[in-house]
Image (cartoon, rainbow, N blue to C red):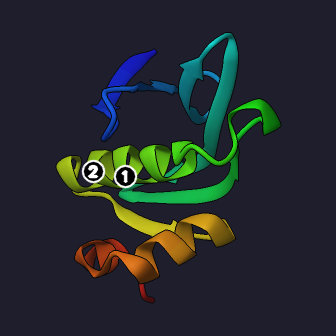
Amino acid sequence: MTQAEAGKDGIPVVDNAEASQFEARVDGHVAFVTYARRGDLIILTHTEVPKELQGHGLGNVLAHAVLERARSERLRVVPRCPFIATYIARHPEYQSLVYEP
């Protein structure tokens, strides 16, 4: 696993490449964003935050960290996950990362 980014609240987000997901661990629970890599594309497929952690902005922390990682690695993003797509729509600074064939 490699560090992705410290989330906005200092929550570490790691890239668990073996599981193809970025993870944030809080109080024994794991929130994650699953992905697939295809060359310089990263396809973000699903975001999940355990119910015990919902309502605290952890999904936003994950989205921010994942998109910053994509930016730093010069990856183009395919936001198949509705949560990630909505996050990008609300944060236009990430729109330039979106792959448009």
Q: Residue furthest top?
A: 28
Residue 18 on image: x %, y %: 61, 21
- 25 w.r.t. 44: above or below: above
* Mark 1 vs 2: CB contact within 8 A: yes
Q: Residue at x 55, y 65 (%)?
A: 84
- 90 w.r.t. 74: above or below: below
Residue 93 on image: x %, y %: 23, 75
Q: From the viewer's perspective, is 41 left or right of 24?
A: left
**Snapshot quadrant of residue 45:** bottom right
Of residues 81 and 92, the one drawn nearer to the viewer in this rendering: 92
Q: Residue at x 54, y 42 (%)?
A: 58
- 11 w.r.t. 101: above or below: above
Which residue, given by chain and number where applicable, does mark 1 sit on? 64
Residue 99 visible at all:
no
Q: What amino acid is labelled 1 in the image?
A: His
Of residues 54 and 34, the one drawn nearer to the viewer in this rendering: 54
Residue 80 visible at all:
yes
Q: What amino acid is labelled 2 in the image?
A: Glu
Which dot marks residue 83? none
Q: Residues within 10 Å of mark 1 (few under 14, many from 20)?
A: many
Task: Please identify the quadrant where the C terminus is shown.
Answer: bottom left
Which dot marks residue 68? 2
**Dot in front, 1 or 2:** 1
**Snapshot quadrant of residue 97:** bottom left
Residue 72 on image: x %, y %: 18, 48
Q: Residue at x 31, y 27 (%)?
A: 10
Q: Residue at x 67, y 24 (%)?
A: 30
Q: Residues within 10 Å of mark 2 (few under 14, many from 20)?
A: some
